[in-house]
């Protein structure tokens, strides 16, 4: 059985759910750690008002008993606290009025009126393309699911996957190396040092000086009613050799990671290792030379490949960078056209962040965790974690 997950739920619906299929039995899952991951996704300097409302916590519906997976599908639920304010608008049964009637809801601590029907698509969102594709005259039927709120469910799924990776001493951390025009360099520090600093940082940035410049830049852009993107780097501890495969295009691990990561809302670019610098260099300066010693076995002194060669892990840490576009919902909105009247309007504004780059990094950790867990199970297979780990140890003995 291939490890997989599906999510369901709308941004202002009752909640989000995820079903994880293919998890082996016997994996110890700490629910508190899942909730900590959810908390990290909600954090980061530059987040908006929604994060003051939601305090995400997961409820286990199935697949985990006495703190361990039991081999059946793992069902998780995250309730939306904001649902109380949106029952009339998002009811699955009753229609809250007709036409483009205004409805009063409590939003950001105040009573506000919103249109039941949204007809003005926001540039940069799925609004217009989704409405045309699914033949919808109310864009809310698109924006509620296209919202990045869905990534809370992905984060929970990734946290369960990370519980499996822990048996193989695999850990993952993301950190911010650019916000808007403010850039930091990738720090040359060990994984534990990087993680310790990141977990204490309000912006998930290792460089404290650059972090303060980023915070100042966010404040400035917030006053202007604009938004910011940035660059995230993901690092892992050294991975087992042999995850992924070169034999088919859809089994190459670099391709699978890239697809999973670029599926995160607003992520528009994926770089593995020093790919873009490599493109302007020479082969003699790019490829990682191979060495051998009895103590280390095969090893490399550099990791420009980012831990992957030919779609297969080579024993080095995984290094991936992601480019995130600025959030398209602006408090100084751009121009758009009403899908019903076809008249020009200023695009409607939903609650938004100035930047969500640190949060996107936490979601990226989850997606990398899940893809690596898939690859572990494909390589070392089994129905119980003890069987899988025994297969792993036999593999190491042959190295």
Image: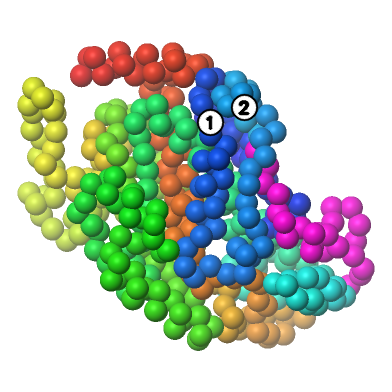
Residue 119 visible in the displayed image: no
Q: Check disc 2: other Cα within 10 Å, few if <14, some if 14-19, many if 20+.
A: many
Is residue 266 found left or right of 176 in the rendered image? right
Q: Is residue 32 left or right of residue 387?
A: right
Quadrant in which the N terminus appears = top right
Q: Is residue 149 magenta?
A: no
Residue 248: image x %, image y %? 37, 32
Tell me which residue sits at (53%, 31%) in the image.
29
Task: Please give the range of residues in magenta.
Answer: 76-100
Q: Between 295 and 323, which is closer to the camera in this rendering?
A: 295
- Mark number, residue 309: none
The residue wearing badge 1 is 29
Q: Are marks 1 and 2 in contact (CB under 8 Å)?
A: yes
The residue lying at 72 percent from left, 85 percent from top is 343
Spatial CA distance of label 1 from label 2 is 8 Å
Tell me, yes or no, whether the highlighted magenta stretch contains residue 89.
Answer: yes
Q: Which residue is mark 2?
A: 64
**Closest to the observer: 155 or 328?**
155
Q: Position of residue 33 (x, y in %)?
A: 51, 41
- The percent coordinates of residue 53 (x first, y second) are 66, 63
Label 2: element kind: strand
Q: Position of residue 26 (x, y in %)?
A: 52, 20
Task: Give the residue displayed 66% in from the left and 35% down from the top.
Answer: 60
Coloration mode: rainbow
Residue 312 lies in what quarter of the image? top left
Q: Residues within 10 Å of mark 1 (few under 14, many from 20)?
A: many
Quarter of the image for residue 369 reads top left
Mark 1: secondary structure: loop
Along the line of sight, the residue nearer the viewer: 135 or 388: 388
First in sequence, mark 1 or 2: give its number: 1
């Amino acid at each position: 059985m291939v490890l997989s997950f599906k999510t369901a739920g709308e941004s202002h619906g009752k909640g989000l759910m995820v079903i994880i299929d293919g998890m082996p039995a016997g994996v110890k899952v700490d629910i508190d750690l899942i909730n900590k991951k959810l908390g990290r996704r909600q954090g980061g300097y530059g987040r908006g008002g929604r994060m003051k409302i939601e305090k995400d916590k997961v409820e286990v519906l199935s697949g985990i008993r006495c703190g361990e997976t039991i081999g059946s599908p793992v069902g998780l639920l995250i309730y939306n606290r904001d649902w109380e304010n949106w029952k009339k608008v998002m009811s699955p049964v009753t229609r809250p009025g007709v036409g483009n009637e205004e409805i009063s809801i409590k939003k950001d601590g105040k009573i506000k009126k919103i249109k039941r029907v949204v007809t003005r698509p926001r540039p940069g969102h799925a609004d217009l393309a989704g409405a045309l594709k699914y033949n919808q005259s109310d864009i809310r039927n698109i924006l509620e699911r296209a919202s990045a709120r869905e990534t809370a469910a992905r984060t929970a799924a990734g946290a369960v996957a990370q519980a499996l990776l822990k048996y193989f001493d695999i850990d993952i951390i993301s950190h911010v190396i650019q916000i808007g025009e403010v850039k930091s360099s990738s720090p040359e520090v060990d994984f534990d040092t990087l993680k310790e600093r990141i977990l204490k940082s309000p912006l998930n940035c290792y460089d404290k000086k650059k972090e303060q410049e980023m915070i100042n830049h966010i404040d400035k852009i917030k006053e202007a009613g604009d938004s910011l993107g940035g660059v995230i780097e993901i690092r892992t501890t050294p991975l087992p050799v042999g995850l992924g495969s070169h034999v088919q295009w859809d089994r190459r691990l670099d391709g699978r990671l890239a697809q999973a990561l670029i599926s995160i809302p607003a992520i528009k670019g994926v770089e593995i290792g020093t790919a873009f610098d490599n493109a302007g260099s020479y082969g003699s300066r790019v490829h990682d030379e191979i060495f051998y010693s009895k103590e280390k076995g095969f090893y490399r002194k550099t990791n420009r490949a980012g831990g992957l060669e030919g779609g297969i892990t080579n024993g080095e840490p995984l290094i991936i960078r992601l480019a995130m576009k600025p959030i398209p919902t602006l408090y100084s909105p751009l121009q758009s056209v009403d899908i019903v009247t076809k008249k020009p309007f200023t695009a409607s504004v939903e609650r938004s962040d100035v930047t969500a780059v640190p949060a996107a990094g936490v979601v990226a950790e989850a997606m990398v965790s899940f893809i690596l867990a898939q690859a572990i199970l494909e390589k070392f297979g089994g129905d119980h974690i003890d069987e899988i780990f025994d297969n792993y140890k036999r593999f190491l003995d042959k190295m």
